[in-house]
Image (cartoon, grey):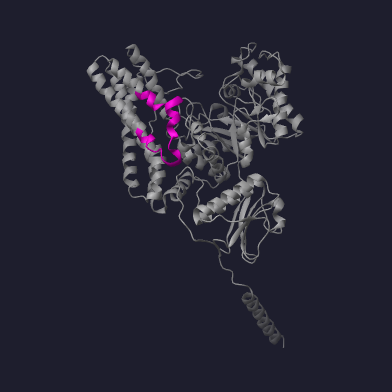
Amino acid sequence: MKTQINYLFSFCLIWVCMTTVYAQPLHQDLVLNRGNFQIVLSEEEPSPLRLAVESLCKDFEKVMGWYPKQSNILDGAKINIVVTTESQQKKFARDKYKLDGFESHRIDVDCSENNIYLSGKDMRGAIYAVYSFSERFLEVPPLWFFSSWKPEHKDSIAVPASYRYYQKSPQVRYRAWFPNDTDLFTPWRKLSEENNERWLETMLRLKLNTVELEATVTYPDYKLNGQAELLRKYGLVLTSHHHVALNNNFLNWDGYWEKVRHMKAPKLLLSNEREMIEFWRYSVETVKRSGMENLWQISFRGKNDQPFWAAFEDAPQTDKERADVINRMIRIQLGLIKEITGEQNPYVRMTFYDELSDLLAAGYLEPPVGENMLWTFVAARRDHYPNVDLVNFTNSSHVKLGYYFNLQFTSTGAHLAPAEGPWKMEANYRYVNSKAPLDFSVVNVGNLREFVLSMSANAQMMWNMNIYNTDEFLYDYCAMYYGDKYAKEIADLYHDYFYAYWQQKPSDFPGMERQYLFQDLRYSRVYDQIADWFERREYTDNPLHDIGFERMPGRSFRIEGNNQVDTLLAGMEKTAPRFRQVAEDCKELMSRLPENRQIFFRDNLYAPCLYMAELSVSMKNYLLAYKSMADKKRCREYLDMAILHLEKAKNALYATQTGVFQSWYAGDSINGKFNLPQKITRLSKIRETL
């Protein structure tokens, strides 16, 4: 009897299970067609999220030729793409999709409700969900604007019924770009609203969240400037440059007293501490009143990017005394932040740049500590690797770290062509993170178009350093922008390009490849300094000298040996053929790429490689002309070749001026950091005088 009951129970259980399976609807993909879906979000969602939704609608328009309707009400007759922050989720998702901490986000498909949910823990999390959906289903890449991307038309878009995508909070809380030395970028931005703002959307598509700016406090009405307001429009965090304290600096000292206090400005003196506190108080109150999401920077430096003792007449003379002054001033600033904001543990960073790095390494500087105090170290000047202050750092105070890394450099680094590369970027950040948890990152990139590869790599690494790998990133990057068929081949060419740069000095930092590089602004300095000797009709084996404000002798060029000219010649003999070979390989491969992939390949890899090849050949001939100055005929011949190849270098870059970038190099020929036309003109004048 018991056995019969067991059989009967088993039969009933099987029947119930079978009935349950067949009673459930067989879910299929949700297929988006023109007119059968809408985008839904609450009217209470913040304006930056609404702006991202508008961008998503434009993405649909690019890909499907149709701009979807937006609504704040679910429509049961349509597929609803529901965009929501966690605070608004109950209105649409009934709080069913759980999220992690800040900026976490997810994509979920619920076929039973005919809904697709793009959810974020907070505003930026929801923005990231929106752009993640666009990238994964509309195939709009993050760099669509900078890559001259052309959409592949889709009549319909299928979203799998079981699709789930989830991103936990990023490892690095603040992930920033610093647009610095923008001789190309600034005039180009002024041409249109799209040029002026599209880079901020690009940052969000790459899942960055912070922009570093110069002083943003204005007078006399407690307002931040237009650049800060632009960040607010897109939902990005504002932080400040390393010579800016509390969103202001001493370049604006006179303006405060004249426009706010209507009086002549007192002198910048350490003895006028009360006046400095008043100046800083106005700055903190301005940021507080604005409601801007701000990562505070404390600092005590001069009127510009210089030590404070260059601007204060009563500054002390010894490093220890100078550090004591800085220690006092930054604590006053931190106290003002806490007092005015009412936060006892605000996020605050201090950046150890130049003289601050030296004082910290010497043990004189005593930065504040705290749970949210971010000690921001800076890659070494001129060449980009961890500096001695970071090497000596031990986290006995249990602070979090920030890191400032230059992908370009004002005076001696990469400028018109990328040089540092994603591998070097990764090595730097891995070293920093080995010292203490990294909570802030900023990369210095002024002319963004030149550096989008390494900027993209940095963005991905900062989200999750545990799984990031540069080789894997580079393959995925090449597959996204050039197609799977050519991804491995192009990834190898990128590697060969970055490794073609001349290393004028062997690496001495443990484990650091390509520590010292001869970037293109070093070429620029060589052209200018040797031209001075040409014009004086003097020859020396060592014509190069350190640039102004150089704190470490020999750092500007780092050319070893007792004959700079011969060492440079040997370097050009090595590097020119390497660049030339990669350029030839690029040219051959470009002919095989689909037409819609060729423009970005040309702009992002082939042109910079050809530019560096021609620049190196020009430099070689220029040096030979300098050595042959006593033989005017031979000197003229070499100069002719130097000018010819410098013109070819310019043409290699300027030929990429198409589409929205048709006037990209206008700034180079006006007040450019390199200024290729000016270099050609100066060499031509030297040639004429021989």
Occupied quadrant, residue 530: top left
Residue 565, percent from left and from top: 34, 20
Kindly identify the residue that appears in the image at 73 percent across and 35 percent down: 345
Residue 318 position in % (x across, y down)? 61, 13
Direction left: furthest residue = 633
Give the camera-side residue of 77 and 554: 77
Q: Quadrant of the N terminus?
A: bottom right
Q: Is residue 218 magenta?
A: no
- Write down the region rendered in magenta: 651-680
**What residue is shown at x 62% (from left), y 26% (from top)?**
244
Whether residue 560 can be seen here: no
75 vs 105: above or below: below
Q: Name the residue rendered at 32%, 27% in the picture.
A: 618
**Magenta stretch, main secondary structure class:** helix
Instruction: Answer with left or right where residue 575 lies relative to residue 131.
Output: left
Nearest the camera: 275 or 403? 275
**Does residue 259 lie above or below 149 as drawn?**
above
Quadrant where the image shows the C terminus: top left
